Image (cartoon, grey):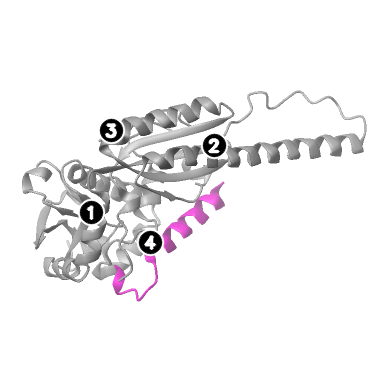
Amino acid sequence: MGEQGRYLYAVCRGLTPEAVDGIVGLSGGRIDLVMEGDLVGLVSPVDLDEYGEDGLRRNLERLDWLEEAARGHDAVVQAAAAIAPTAPTRLATIFLDDEGVRRRLRERRDAIAAALDRVEGHEEWSVKVLTRVADTEPEPVPVASSGADYLRRKREQQEARFADDHDAHFVAERVHDALVPVVSASRRLSPQDPRLAGHEGTMVHNAAYLVHRDRSGEFVDRVQEQSDAYPGVVVDARGPWPPYSFAMLDES
Amino acid sequence: MSSTAVAPAASDNRAIALVDLLDRLLGTGVVIAGDVVISLAGVDLVELRLRALLRTIEGDA
């Protein structure tokens, strides 16, 4: 076992130690609370052989390691966010000791406080819009009578696909517009790589919505309405999650 | 917190799909710079690695 560092999962306000009772950190480490004024950093010890620069450079290329770290990070964040305003940190935010954590909390106090104010009482929902993969494909293609015939049919298929994607983009904007009035903030994320996400069809919309707990029922209803209104696309909504996409700090 | 799929889901139904989690944990929202990342002098290690990872997966496909 090498030198130990401190892994910071999230910064909370008004979190008491009981909140993380029974929650285990990465590599089975104990979760400790680092206090700085009214801010509470959630940390656990990690081995710097694994989480130092060299270790991270090596490990972040291993999908199994990345998944374990991301899930472990998420478990701690979920436990805290269920109880107190929580600003999750980026994966692998590592300090050499608790004093390093406290120093950073002091330096960024105003920005952290603003982020916590923004997310307090809120949850994050993910909404994606995907083109529906046609059930009819592959359609029986009559034997092309000529090369020109084949090329024409090929072009028509491509144009149809393009038109579908274009319509789906239009629908995605309508869905987004319908959700905005019931959310406190929204953020567009890049469409995901189907090789990672495992989806079929084209992802034309991938967004995060910050929804107040009191309005989550209303939000879910709106999503359902939109899903019913546009049967030509898949509207995939998930949540509620901790406010990962809305805890970013303003530039200092 | 649990996950509620309120519409037909295209991906699996785990609480947060790994790809969604990585979108968020590696996304643009840098909350706090840690000691380890800071010593890399502005190089965004995590995103760099993810890109390398994606290239690997693409290479396999």
Callout 3 touching callout 1 (CB < 8 Å)? no
**Left-right relation of A70 to A135:** left
Tell which of A119 and A7 is nearer to you.
A119
**Separation (CA) of disc 4 from disc 1:** 27 Å
**Separation (CA) of disc 3 from disc 1:** 23 Å
Q: Amino acid at mark 4?
A: Val
**Could you tell me what secondary structure mostly forms the magenta stretch?**
helix
Residue B2's label in the rendered image is 3
Residue A117's label in the rendered image is 1
* Residue at the spot of label 2: A130
Q: Is residue A221 above or below residue A92?
A: above
**Separation (CA) of disc 3 from disc 2:** 23 Å
Circle nearer the N terminus (4, 3): 3
The spot of residue A33 in percent (x, y) is 10, 55
Q: Is residue A167 above or below residue B23?
A: above
Circle nearer the N terminus (2, 1): 1
Q: Quadrant of residue B27?
A: bottom left
- Magenta range is B37-61
Residue B46's label in the rendered image is 4
Q: Residue at x 53, y 38 (%)?
A: A174
**Left-right relation of A220 to A45:** right
